[in-house]
Image: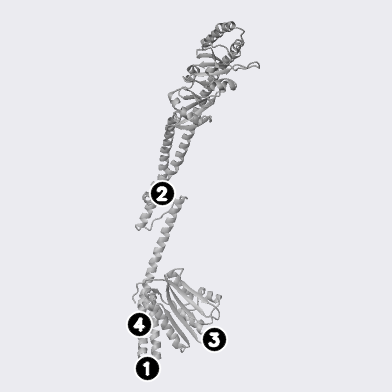
């Protein structure tokens, strides 16, 4: 995939690459800013919606709390009434007075309460005293003593709100107990829950609202959807605000606690409902981003064309030079990189013209030199013929030593001259050094010994000519000839090592110090010295090639020549 993308990118024109680069650099921050702005706007909408819900929920809580306070006030007006306290305590001397209070006071009072507040469905005294039961108004505690709400009422403090099986709410409040009282009497008031929560429908329009008591028991739900989410209430009942997932739907919840009863009123709002205006914000964001991108595309197109036009002009000039128009005058007054590139190209044309002229002049000189070299070939032929004649005369006169010297000299010059070619087979170079050393041995009356250790593999390669002869000459002149005492020897070796050939010329002369070694390789001698050999090797084969010298005073010298494998197709 990466190679495919790179290949596609490489096939694009430079103006297309420049356009895409600008576009990428600009679009990414614009999209990031647009996304950030949208997210911030969406969050602001959510916060505003949450604040609106909290405001409505506070109004619902205050309204419900006010209604509950009215019921608490009604309960207090009853339980602190002396007549009602006397009725439930059975403080009557005879039943006549009790009957009068029940018929003339209690029944009218209860009827008045239910008339003034139609949501009150029933008011009952549950007493532990011996007062006889009187319809639904006065009943024995035996009827409800097993109810949990009754137990909470008589052992607790304050009024206890709960819900019966029919879905209606009721509140139970204890009568005050005095030191002389041994019984606990309770006022029970059943209330129509629809009337109690009637204001919630208008205040929570569009929201799902549930109300639960301290135990998490659902008391009210303003819709079927809210009732179906009642199970989710227990998951978040201890958190005032949270986010839940109900049946795959994301819901925001806001809660308030009713101080009067400890109930929790919680509002469930679908997340999509809180971000209804997000679509319009998204559309506006997309329109702004699209407008910015369209405007930037125009700017990018203008900039890229302006920049690329000069490159096209430079490219046209290069094409003309490529076609042979070397006389063009190329120059730019601009100081930017394209202007510098144009001026450098103009300087290259000037330099190219100079090199062409120089090469043309050198070609003429080379042709003249080749003509002179061709003419000078007569001299080597004359030399070979003369040496051949001397050799035959020496053979006829049985002067074998002279014949051997002449033959070695002839072979030496033949391999040295090599018809003017600098590149010769390794075999010819080794023959050349052997011929030279044969002559040196005869001239010195065989005062030293020569050993050869040649690896047969090296014969399959080529090398520069006249490399080993100056080294051998230096070994004889400054090594063996300077030796004091003992017989001298010279060892010539050639070994292939991995991808190189190493030639070694070793002697048992007096050796050299570091200063002498440095001077041999760096200073020019009167003849064709080691410095020239070292430079020829590095110029032709590279910096890794050259002469290496290992020597210590009194221990002899070993000079090595390292060259890479070159042309392994030589015929033996």
Q: What residue is rendered at 47% in x and 82% in y?
A: 490
- Which badge, 2 or 4, comes first in the chain's sequence? 2
Please tell me which residue lies in front, 344 or 133.
Answer: 133
Total marks drawn? Answer: 4
Give the CA separation, mark 2 to mark 1.
Answer: 86 Å
Figure check: 202 above or below 556: above
- Which badge, 2 or 1, comes first in the chain's sequence? 2
Give the CA separation, mark 2 to mark 4.
Answer: 64 Å
Q: Secondary structure at mark 4?
A: helix
From the image, tell me which residue sits under label 1: 398
The disc label shown at residue 484, or none: 3
- With 10 as the anchor, is 231 left or right in this view? right
From the image, tell me which residue sits under label 2: 310
Q: What residue is rendered at 37% in x and 57% in y?
A: 321
- Which badge, 1 or 4, comes first in the chain's sequence? 4
Give the CA separation, mark 1 to mark 3.
Answer: 36 Å
Figure check: 550 above or below 225: below
From the image, tell me which residue sits under label 4: 381
Local crowd size for mark 1, using a 10 Å CA cut-off: few (<14), some (14–19), many (≥20): few
Q: Secondary structure at mark 1?
A: loop
């Amino acid at each position: 995939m990466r190679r495919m993308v790179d290949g596609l990118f490489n096939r694009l024109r430079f103006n297309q690459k420049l356009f895409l680069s600008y576009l990428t650099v600009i679009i990414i921050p614009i999209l990031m800013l647009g996304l950030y702005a949208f997210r911030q706007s969406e969050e602001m909408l959510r916060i505003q919606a949450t604040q609106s819900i909290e405001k409505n929920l506070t109004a619902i809580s205050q309204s419900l709390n006010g209604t509950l306070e009215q019921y608490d006030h009604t309960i207090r007006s009853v339980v602190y009434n002396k007549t009602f306290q006397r009725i439930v305590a059975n403080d009557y001397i005879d039943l006549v007075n009790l009957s009068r209070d029940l018929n003339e006071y209690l029944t009218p009072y209860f009827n008045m309460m239910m008339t003034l507040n139609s949501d009150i469905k029933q008011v009952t005294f549950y007493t532990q005293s011996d007062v006889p039961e009187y319809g639904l108004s006065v009943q024995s505690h035996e009827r409800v003593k097993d109810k949990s709400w009754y137990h909470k009422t008589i052992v607790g403090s304050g009024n206890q709100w709960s819900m019966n099986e029919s879905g209606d709410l009721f509140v139970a409040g204890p009568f005050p107990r005095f030191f002389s009282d041994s019984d606990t009497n309770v006022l029970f008031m059943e209330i129509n829950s629809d009337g109690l929560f009637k204001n919630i429908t208008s205040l929570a329009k569009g929201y799902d609202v549930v109300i639960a008591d301290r135990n998490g028991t659902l008391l009210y739900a303003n819709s079927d959807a809210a009732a179906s989410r009642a199970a989710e209430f227990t998951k978040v009942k201890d958190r005032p605000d949270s986010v839940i997932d109900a049946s795959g739907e994301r819901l925001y919840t806001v809660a308030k606690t009713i101080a009067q009863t400890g109930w929790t009123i919680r509002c469930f709002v679908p997340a999509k409902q809180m971000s209804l205006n997000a679509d319009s914000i998204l559309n506006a964001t997309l329109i702004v981003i699209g407008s910015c991108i369209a405007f930037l595309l125009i700017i990018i197109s203008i900039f890229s064309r302006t920049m690329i036009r000069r490159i096209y002009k430079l490219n046209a000039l290069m094409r003309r030079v490529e076609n042979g128009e070397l006389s063009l005058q190329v120059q730019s007054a601009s100081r930017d990189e394209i202007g510098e590139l144009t001026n450098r190209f103009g300087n290259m044309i000037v330099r190219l013209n100079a090199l062409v002229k120089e090469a043309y002049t050198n070609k003429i000189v080379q042709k003249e030199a080749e003509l002179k070299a061709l003419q000078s070939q007569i001299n080597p032929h004359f030399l070979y013929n003369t040496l051949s004649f001397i050799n035959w005369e020496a053979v006829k006169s049985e002067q074998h030593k002279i014949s051997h010297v002449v033959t070695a000299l002839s072979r030496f010059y033949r391999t040295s001259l090599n018809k003017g070619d600098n590149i010769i087979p390794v075999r010819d170079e080794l023959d050349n050094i052997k011929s030279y050393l044969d002559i040196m041995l005869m001239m010195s009356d065989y005062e030293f010994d020569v050993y050869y250790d040649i690896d047969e593999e090296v014969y399959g390669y080529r090398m520069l000519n006249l490399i080993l002869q100056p080294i051998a000459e230096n070994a004889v002149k400054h090594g063996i000839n300077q030796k004091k005492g003992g017989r001298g020897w010279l060892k010539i070796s050639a070994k292939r090592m991995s991808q190189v050939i190493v030639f070694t010329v070793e002697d048992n002369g007096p050796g050299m110090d570091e200063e002498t070694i440095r001077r041999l390789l760096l200073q020019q001698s009167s003849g064709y010295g080691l410095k020239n050999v070292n430079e020829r090797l590095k110029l032709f084969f590279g910096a890794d090639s050259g002469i290496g010298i290992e020597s210590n005073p009194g221990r002899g010298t070993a000079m090595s020549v390292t060259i890479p494998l070159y042309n392994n197709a030589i015929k033996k």
